[in-house]
């Protein structure tokens, strides 16, 4: 019998293949009839199999991702597409207000989401709510500090942004090419308690302090350039990034790390919204529920494209069970001094759009700085 | 004589015309219109406002980037032409036909791989701990900074342009009348003098066009200044992406793009005029 099934006769083989061939169309028709196509506008990695695979199987959904780089790019993509093009939209916190103001996202029902499981800091995240109405659900966040090559600099070296002026970093300081996180860090170095809400005098000081660093700069890099120049050691330290870059490199064996210096760090925050006019609102809601559930959060924390911290306390528990190494690496262990304590100690400020200047002022200065 | 174009000639010339209209002239007209639009709250609004032109042209950082890019593209055209000429000369004049064919084939091979990939892999050669500096280290030299500066950018331009410039030079040198060279030799003209006074003037048009290609490709290139130059200092192409990245300022980016197009057209017309100008006129 065993021999028969491992060495079937030619006739048996023909029968089996014919049967399989005849059955195939039914299988695929059955599957196709139920598959929902969910389009997602997000930063790279959010609709890759390591994150969405399980959800796709569970609900017979197929994600169609459209990836962007930066909030401006995202707003541009939405502005150029008809309403309903994107079912779910992942956005950085400072751009949710812009999405809302332009009427690109649906209002959400807070009762649909497990906010009670979230740390109190993230239950009413600024910008996600407008006049008591919910428009976006926080899904992950990360800190930006000093990213450095641990083979050259020590943790003590990286304890202050003053290291950026150190002679060891001359020509070796890289900038992630976006004004907001870089200028925010210089603002923290200057001791501004509210780093993005600057009086004109304080803004001038930030510009002066930034300009003083120009001689140190080895380059201005995009996503890919940041990775490669940290990895090949061309840049010793980076301003404007955090574990979302160094965490990926670290997991791949590079000796790089991110420290939150004494002057404090910045926080980036990602959240999901439902696109205005989406025809799959029901499934979009299910997705947001899934990715903010403990299991979804544990996956999100360890996303292959870039790791992040998660706002769901039960998600922390799930991550510590499923992947204790990553939980420890990202300082997300309950019952000890952890990432949330950094926020509670006031060491972390939310990345925001400039409060008293226009975005254009900041951008213009950044161009001047690059060209200087 | 019938001056109306025949169906036959139209069949062959129309697709090109339509292509140019659809993908060059219309977008160009749109770009001009776009440069007068305004942006409010990240959204572009059709408008007729010269604010973008004034804003861009009144900024020192734009003119710095403009003249820097112009200088770098010119340097690229001159240096690459000089680097390419000995190779082209050798291929065209010194090699047997079979070897010549092989050399041309070898020069085409770089185009098999994407330029972006080639530039990325150059990082491995040029970085401080890279292959070139490691080699120089054995000789007790260096390390020399070759990445994230102007040298890196020019090395990238050479990656992009050198094979093409050599090919164009070879083809134009192939058309130089060999009798002229022989005549020069018969009249006791030395080797170097023959090259300078007979070969280069005869192949002038091709050599200038080759240099023009190097200029055009370098002037608008984005990949090398970013990945080998580290955006440090920025060129106009990098400036365009910067402008669009922050605040959706496509109209201002259009102003930069139009300035670049105007520059390229001016340089191209001047170069072609120079290339085909007859001696003595």
Image (cartoon, rainbow, N blue to C red):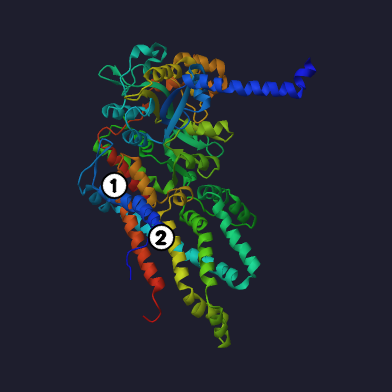
The span from disc 2 to disc 1 (Cα, nearest Å) is 44 Å
Which residue is at 49% across, 44% downward? A168
Q: Is residue A19 above or below residue A69?
A: above
Q: Position of residue A62 (x, y in %)?
A: 47, 24
Circle 1 chain: B
Is tag 2's residue or tag 1's residue first in the polypeptide sequence?
A: 2
Q: Is residue A215 above or below residue B267?
A: above
The circle drawn on residue B252 is 1
Decide which of A183, A252 is in the foreground and name it. A252
| A306 on left or right of B3 | right
* Residue at image mark 2: B8
Which residue is at 52% across, 26% downward? A49
Which residue is at 41% across, 15% downward? A118
Which residue is at 75% across, 18% downward? A5
Decide which of A23, A200 is in the foreground and name it. A23
Does any portion of residue B61 appear in the rendered image? no
Q: Nearer the viewer, mark 2 or mark 1?
A: 2
């Amino acid at each position: 019998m065993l021999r028969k099934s491992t060495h079937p006769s030619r006739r048996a083989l023909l029968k089996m293949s014919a049967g399989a061939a005849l059955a195939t169309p039914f299988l695929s028709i059955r599957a196709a009839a139920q598959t929902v196509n969910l389009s997602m506008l997000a930063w790279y990695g959010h609709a890759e199999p390591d994150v969405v695979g399980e959800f796709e199987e569970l609900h017979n959904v197929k994600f169609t991702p459209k990836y962007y780089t930066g909030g401006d790019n995202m707003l541009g993509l939405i502005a150029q597409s008809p309403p309903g093009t994107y079912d779910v939209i992942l956005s950085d916190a400072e751009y949710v207000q812009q999405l809302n103001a332009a009427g690109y996202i649906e209002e959400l029902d807070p009762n649909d989401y497990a906010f009670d499981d979230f740390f109190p800091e993230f239950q009413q995240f600024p910008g996600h709510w407008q006049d008591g109405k919910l428009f976006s659900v926080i899904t992950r966040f990360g800190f930006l500090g000093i990213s450095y090559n641990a083979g050259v600099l020590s943790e003590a070296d990286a304890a202050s942004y003053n290291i950026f002026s150190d002679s060891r970093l001359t020509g070796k300081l890289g900038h992630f090419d976006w004004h907001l996180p870089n200028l925010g860090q210089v603002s923290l170095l200057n001791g501004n308690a509210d780093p993005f809400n600057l009086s004109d005098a304080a803004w001038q000081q930030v510009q002066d302090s930034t300009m003083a660093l120009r001689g140190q700069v080895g380059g201005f890099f995009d996503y890919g350039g940041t990775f490669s120049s940290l990895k090949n050691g061309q840049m010793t330290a980076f301003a404007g990034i955090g574990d979302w870059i160094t965490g990926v490199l670290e997991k791949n064996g590079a000796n790089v790390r991110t420290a939150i210096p004494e002057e404090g760090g910045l926080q980036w925050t990602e959240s999901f919204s439902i696109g205005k006019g989406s025809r799959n609102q029901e499934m979009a809601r299910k997705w947001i529920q899934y990715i903010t559930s403990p299991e979804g959060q544990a996956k999100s924390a360890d996303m292959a494209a870039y790791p992040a911290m998660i706002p769901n306390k039960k998600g922390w528990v799930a991550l510590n069970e499923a992947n204790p190494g990553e939980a420890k690496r990202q300082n997300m262990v309950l019952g000890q001094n952890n990432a949330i304590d950094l926020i509670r100690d006031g060491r972390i400020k939310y990345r925001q759009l400039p409060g008293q200047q226009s975005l254009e002022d900041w951008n213009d200065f950044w161009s001047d700085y690059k060209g200087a | 004589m019938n001056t109306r174009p025949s169906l036959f000639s139209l069949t062959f010339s129309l697709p090109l015309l339509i292509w140019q209209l659809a993908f060059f002239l219309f977008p160009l007209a749109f770009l001009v219109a776009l440069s007068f639009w305004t942006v409010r709250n990240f959204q572009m609004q059709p408008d007729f406002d010269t604010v973008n032109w004034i804003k861009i042209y009144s900024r020192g950082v734009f003119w710095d980037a403009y003249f820097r890019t112009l200088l770098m593209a010119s340097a690229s055209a001159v240096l690459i032409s000089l680097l390419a000429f000995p190779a082209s000369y050798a291929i065209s004049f010194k090699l047997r036909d079979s070897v010549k064919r092989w050399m041309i084939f070898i020069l085409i091979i770089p185009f098999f791989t994407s330029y972006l990939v080639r530039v990325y892999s150059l990082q491995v050669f040029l970085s401080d701990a890279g292959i070139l500096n490691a080699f120089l280290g054995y000789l007790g030299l260096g390390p020399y900074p070759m990445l994230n500066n102007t040298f890196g950018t020019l090395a990238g331009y050479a990656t992009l342009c050198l094979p093409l410039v050599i090919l164009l030079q070879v083809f134009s040198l192939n058309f130089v009348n060999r009798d002229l060279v022989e005549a020069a030799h018969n009249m006791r003209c030395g080797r170097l003098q023959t090259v300078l006074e007979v070969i280069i003037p005869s192949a002038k048009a091709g050599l200038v066009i080759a240099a023009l290609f190097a200029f055009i490709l370098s002037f608008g290139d984005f990949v090398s200044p970013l990945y080998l130059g580290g955006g440090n200092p920025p060129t106009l192409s990098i400036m365009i992406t910067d402008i669009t990245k922050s605040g959706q300022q496509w109209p201002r980016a259009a102003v930069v793009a139009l300035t670049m197009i105007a520059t390229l057209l001016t340089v191209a017309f001047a170069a072609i005029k120079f290339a085909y100008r007859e001696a003595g006129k």
